[in-house]
Amino acid sequence: MSHPNKPIVTVQNLSIGFDQEIILDNISFDIYSGEIFVILGGSGSGKSTLLKHIIGLYAPLSGRIMINGQDLTSTDESGKIKILRTIGISYQSGALFGSMTLLENVRLPLEEFTSLSKDAMDLVSRIKLYQVGLIGYENHMPSELSGGMQKRAAIARAMALDPAILFLDEPSAGLDPITSLELDELVLNLSNSLGITFVIVTHELSSIFKIGQRMIILDKKRKTIVAQGEPEDLRLNSPDPWVRSFLNREPLKRQ
């Protein structure tokens, strides 16, 4: 089925691994502008490693990664930095600086990559905190916040430079079900109001079926994508018994 929007990320014939040990072999997929795209797989399937390749932290063994039509895998360092300025990333741990207030954490990318005045940077930072529901917490330290609030603050910082694409690595990790649901609602609200493209690595099936619009599923044994499409459609109709078993949380029936 064709997609109404154009691809904002294209992965072509990508093979990744370390010391020539293949983790994922010759995979290809597109992520479309404005969608919430999920990368799913069992433990050790390469979800987070794939994410780190897409955001340029690791170089692939072969293949191409295109972001907004620009080839991340073949450009020079300055070109790579220019491409990566269009994305934001929130890591599993949140990665906030414990010695800085929330406002200072969110302001950090603006200090590094813009020439805005301090007042302008503070204003932008407050807007980002407002967008994630943390206005009024500007002067709090990360240690004073709950885990869910820390995740929201990390998303605010990732949004500081108005990225077209926001990558979230296991955003619900360590959160209780209610806080995880609130984070899902935040992603949906940001997607609807700002049109940001979300790429989310997760194993939380409830989140996937609530917010995911399309997904790929990675398999450790086969070292490849074993399914891609709409989560509910794959859960019900995938021709792969392992995929249906995985998405339905059911034991794989032996023939």
Image (cartoon, rainbow, N blue to C red):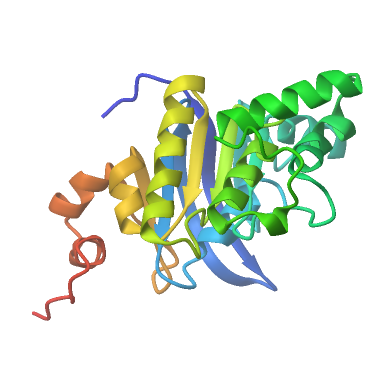
**Which quarter of the figure is the C terminus placed in?**
bottom left
**From where the camera sits, is residue 79 visible?**
yes
Q: In this view, does 53 lie above or below 118?
A: below
- Marks counted in the figure total 0
- Measuring from the top left, give residue 179's x and y in whole percent: 43, 53
**From where the camera sits, is residue 162 visible?**
no
> Image quarter for residue 49?
bottom right
> Image quarter for residue 91?
bottom right
Q: Is residue 160 above or below residue 172?
A: above
Q: In this view, does 86 lie to the left or right of 119?
A: left
Residue at 77% x, 41% y: name it. 139
For this orientation, the residue located farthest to the left is: 255
Q: Is residue 74 left or right of residue 50?
A: right
For this orientation, the residue located farthest to the bottom is: 254
Which one is in front, 218 or 250?
250
**Which quarter of the figure is the N terminus placed in?**
top left
- Measuring from the top left, give residue 118's x and y in whole percent: 90, 24
Residue at 52% x, 27% y: name it. 196
- Measuring from the top left, give residue 104's x and y in whole percent: 82, 40
- Measuring from the top left, give residue 65's x and y in whole percent: 61, 41
Q: Is residue 240 above or below residue 119?
A: below
Residue at 50% x, 60% y: name it. 47
Which one is in front, 153 or 158?
153
Q: In this view, does 131 lie to the left or right of 27?
A: right
